[in-house]
Structure formats: structure tokens, C-alpha cells
Amino acid sequence: MDEKILAIITTTPELVGGASPIFVTKNVDELIARAFLLEKILDAMVHKLNDSTYIIVKH
Amino acid sequence: MDKETLAITFGIAFGFIARLRLLQSDYRQYPTYPHGQVIHLALGLIASALGAVAIPALLKPDYTAVTFLTLAAQQFRDVRNMERQTLQKLDESELVPRGFSYIEGIAMVFEGRNYIVILAALFTSASVMVAGWIAGLVVGVIVIILSTFLKSGKSIGEIGAVYEVPLRVEGPNLYAADIYLMNVGLPENRERILQNGVGIVIEPLDASSRITISNLGQRQAILHDVSSILGVTRDSGEPALTPLAKLDLNDGRLGLVVLPQEKNISKLIQIIKNVPVLESAIRKPNQFDAKKQV
């Protein structure tokens, strides 16, 4: 398996956990801005799990 | 000029012409490589010389001369290795890579074509030795015409129907018509895909082509060909803008999203139809005979 979750970005930190870096943001706008930045930095794809949680996955 | 020299000259000439004719179709696989072409023409010349010499050497009789044909086979297997390695290295710097299957297919074709050249030279020189130069001329022309038939295999257009479908976004999910493609997280990327992307569906014509289309290497080959001809709206650091192909598991249709720089739909469909069916992707379940006892 090459797929790997590189980071989790969320507004609801109580719903996520695990070994990946978790970025907690205040609101959805900040969430999207953070996801955008991490996508460019990590060269990995942003996926939306639900309205409050995005993950960055290396494919 | 004695018979042997005439036979060898004819053999080399026709073998080389065969290679020249076979090289033409390599343009798509190799867009711009004048030096790559020189390499293959030179190898073609050597191959035709080998083929041309074999029969005169046998008739001379100089039987040991034939043993170097085995050496030749070894030599041309290296062609395949060389081609594979070069293309794999180059593939690393492609925005939309060819994929291993496509590379293997190209490498195999290069090796195979050298053997065709050897055979063309062999038949031509043999007929000159047996029946004179006029016969050699006729056989040479026939062999070259025959070799052209071997040039190309099937293309996607022959095994499936290709048509455009609208792309749509449902929440973060991207669909080509009803086929799920991927989850795109950022709204900006979704907008860009809807703006620049084109949705395509390839519908297989029968069970065999369904398996061929589902082959991952074959899908990558389609995406690569489209991207290399029409360009791709993509850069490193933009993984969401990767062209993608996904199957509809119910009926075997293949849904694609491509992001061409030049949004010319009819040309795009024509390109997909012309993508070669990879030899490694061909399966023939239709030929399975359940009644036959093993």
C-alpha cells in the first residue's frame, strides 16, 4: 500500500485521533485555507471526509 | 557482381526499408527524438545485414557463420532492456506517466521489429540466391507490405465506444455521468476541474474488451496519450488535477476525467480511439471453451 494519510485538518478535534499530525482550525474557512496550503507543501491530495474534517493523502 | 554480393545487398536494402517503414508509427510513442531514431535505424541496418548474410553463408557453405544469428538474438534482447530503462527514467519526469505496461509494450515492439527486419532481409536474400534478383525484388516488396500489417495492433476505438459525458460534482465527490471518480476536497480544485475538465466514457463492446479496458496499465496509457497530445492543466503540487480513470463495476464502462489544455472534444475522442491496445492488457475470455476437457 502506497496510500498514506499525511495530515488531518479538522474543526472538531474530539472526533479524530491517531498517528498523523492533526491540525485544528477555528472555522471552515480556515480549514480550507490550511488544507490548500498543505496540499501544495506535501504534494498530496486533499479529501473531504465531512464538513469538519479534511485529510491529506499521498497517492 | 556475383550472386552472393547481390543477395546481401538486396537483403540489407529491403531490411532497412522495412525498418524505415516500421519506424513511422513510433512517432506517437516517441514524440521528438531525432537521436532515438538514429539509434533504431542503425540497429535496423545491423539487423538487416545479419539477416541478409545468413543464407549466402549457408550456401557457400560456411555453416559456422549462422551461429552468430544467435548472438544477434541476444543483442536485440538488449534493445528491449535499453528501451525499457530509458523510458522508465523519462517516465519519472512526466506529469502524466506512461506506466509500466505501456513502456513494456513499446520496448517489446522495438525488439519485435528488429526480428521482422531480420526476416525481411533473410527472405529477400534467400530468393535472390535461389531465383535471381528479379525474384528478390518481388519477394522484398511483398515482405515489406506484409511487415506493414504487423505494424499496428488494435486500438481502443475498435474495442469500445468512446463518447463525452458531463462532469458533475456532488458534495466533494466528482462523477463522470454516473461513474464515481474521486473525492476532491478543495472547492477551488472542484471548480477548476469542472471548468477545464472533460468527462469521457469508454463503453466496452464485449467481455474481452471489458477486461482489456479495466487493465490499469491500459488506462494509464490512455491518459498519457491524451495528456501528451492535448496537454494537461496540471503541475507538481497539484495532485487534485491528475487525470483519472475509474470503472463502473456494474457494467464495465470506464469513466475518465482529463484536463486538456486544448479543449477540443472531437480531437480528444479521436485520440482516445487511436490509443493502442496494449499487448499485456489483452485477454480473451471469449475463447474459453467450457466443454473442452483438460
Image: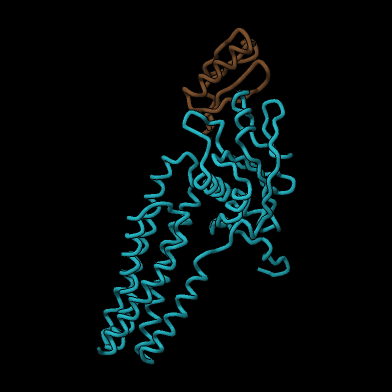
Examine the rendered structure and indicate whether residue B44 appears above or below residue B218. Answer: below
* Drawing shade for chain A: brown
Instruction: Report the chain shown in cyan.
Output: B
Give residue B276's quadrant in the image: bottom right
- How far from the left and from the top, in percent, is residue A17? 59, 15
Q: Quadrant of the N terminus of chain B?
A: bottom left
Examine the rendered structure and indicate whether residue B204 appears above or below residue A34. Answer: below
**Which residue is depicted at the point 65% across and 23% down?**
A49
The one of B181 and B58 positioned closer to us in this rendering: B181
Q: Residue reaching furthest top?
A: A26
**So how many labels did they put on this image?**
0
Q: Is B47 positioned to the left or the right of B170 in the image?
A: left
Give residue B209's quadrant in the image: bottom right
Q: Is A34 positioned to the left or the right of A48 in the image?
A: left
Colouring mode (rainbow / by chain / secondary structure / one colour): by chain
The one of B280 and A42 positioned closer to us in this rendering: A42
Q: Is B173 positioned to the left or the right of B60 in the image?
A: right
- How far from the left and from the top, in percent, is residue B183? 64, 30
Give residue B2's quadrant in the image: bottom left
The one of B193 and B224 positioned closer to us in this rendering: B193
Q: Residue reaching furthest bottom?
A: B131
**Which residue is depicted at the point 46% across and 22% down?**
A41
**Which residue is depicted at the point 57% across and 52% down?**
B271
Q: Quadrant of the C terminus of chain B?
A: bottom right
- How far from the left and from the top, in percent, is residue B265? 63, 46
- How far from the left and from the top, in percent, is residue B252? 70, 49
